[in-house]
Amino acid sequence: MRADFDFDVVRNISAIERLKCGLLRDISLLFEATLPHADSAGDEKEILADALLNIYQLADKMNISYERLDEAAAKAIKIHDKKLFSRLTREGD
């Protein structure tokens, strides 16, 4: 039984590392796509979608539910929006 558990842990670690590499690849592709005169210009939407998929798969492997991830993202967006609104109102003075 212990060998099966050890194998599952190793397999899960391997999957997490693979997903992290995929996320880094997506970020690299996004930088490349946004360079002036890039051949991949216009692919940003697909690249971001792939990155988002990698994030959700990574969260799943890390035992973070999609609901908890969505809640954390919503909270981060609210914080960002408050900071942006505060900055914009200060600049308008």
Image (cartoon, rainbow, N blue to C red):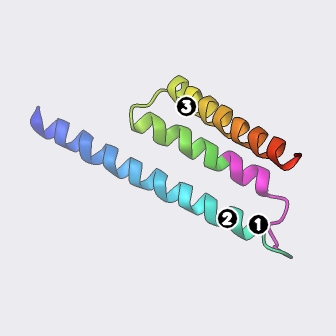
Circle 1 residues within 10 Å: few <14, some 14–19, many ≥20: some
Tell me, yes or no, whether the highlighted magenta stretch contains residue 75: no
Please, which residue is most extreme toward the bottom here?
37
- In the rendered image, which quarter is residue 18 located in? bottom left
The kind of residue on which mark 1 rests is Ala
The kind of residue on which mark 3 rests is Ala
Kind of element beneath mark 2: helix
Circle 3 residues within 10 Å: few <14, some 14–19, many ≥20: few
Mark identifier at residue 33: 1
Name the quadrant of the N terminus: top left
Query: Which residue is painted at 69% across and 41% down in the image?
Result: 83
Mark identifier at residue 29: 2
Query: Which residue is painted at 84% across and 75% down in the image?
Result: 36
Of the numbered discs 3 and 1, the one sitting upstream in the chain is: 1
In the rendered structure, the answer to whether residue 31 lies left or right of residue 18 reads right
Kind of element beneath mark 1: helix
Q: Position of residue 21 (x, y in %)?
A: 48, 59
Q: Position of residue 60 (x, y in %)?
A: 45, 34
Please, which residue is most extreme toward the front here?
93
- Mark 3 or 1, closer to the camera: 3
